[in-house]
Image (tube, rainbow, N blue to C red):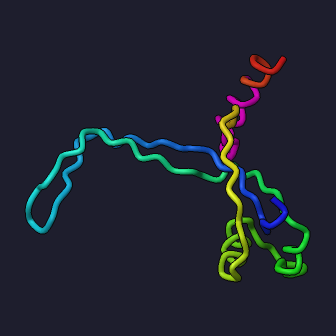
Amino acid sequence: NSQHSVTMGLRQYEHQIPFGVAVTENDLVVKIKEKPIHRYFVSGGIYVLNPEILKHVPENSYLDMPDLIEILISKNKNIGAYPFYEYWIDIGRMDDYERAHADFLGIFK
């Protein structure tokens, strides 16, 4: 969307707590949630930038995307969300990179 300063590619991430979770109010247990699953949208590391945001990037200095996005949010800029559900794997660790490489050779011949 051209009205967004940045659009972030988001991937759904699930985390299951492997225990029953006690919900409390004061000193009373009011409910038990058995092995709840929490779902979040996480950054897929894919961004589409509107060229107008470049004026918010200081010259000759390091600025990572989360910091830039926080700056833009503080300036009331629109940050778009684009959930995607296609194949994706984080390659920030060597074993994940190797898995992605093997997946590529096996799946995307």
x%, y% of residue 73? 67, 75
Count of numbered labels shown in the rendering:
0
Per the picture, the main secondary structure of the magenta-coloured stretch is: helix
**On the picture, is 43 further left or further right than 20?**
right
**On the picture, is 16 further left or further right than 80?**
left
x%, y% of residue 104? 78, 25
Above or below, comparing residue 90 to residue 73 in the picture: above
- Which quarter of the picture shows residue 99? top right
- Which quarter of the picture shows residue 81? bottom right
* 96 drawn magenta: yes
**On the picture, is 50 further left or further right than 88?**
right
**The residue stretch that appears in magenta:** 89-102
**On the picture, is 76 further left or further right than 12?**
right
Residue under the image location 90 percent in, 80 percent down: 59
Residue under the image location 8 percent in, 60 percent down: 28
x%, y% of residue 31? 16, 50
Above or below, comparing residue 88 to residue 49 in the picture: above
Residue under the image location 65 percent in, 53 percent down: 43
Quadrant of image for the N terminus: bottom right
Q: Nearer the viewer, residue 68 or 4?
A: 4
Q: Nearer the viewer, residue 6 or 91?
A: 6
x%, y% of residue 32? 18, 46
Quadrant of image for the C terminus: top right
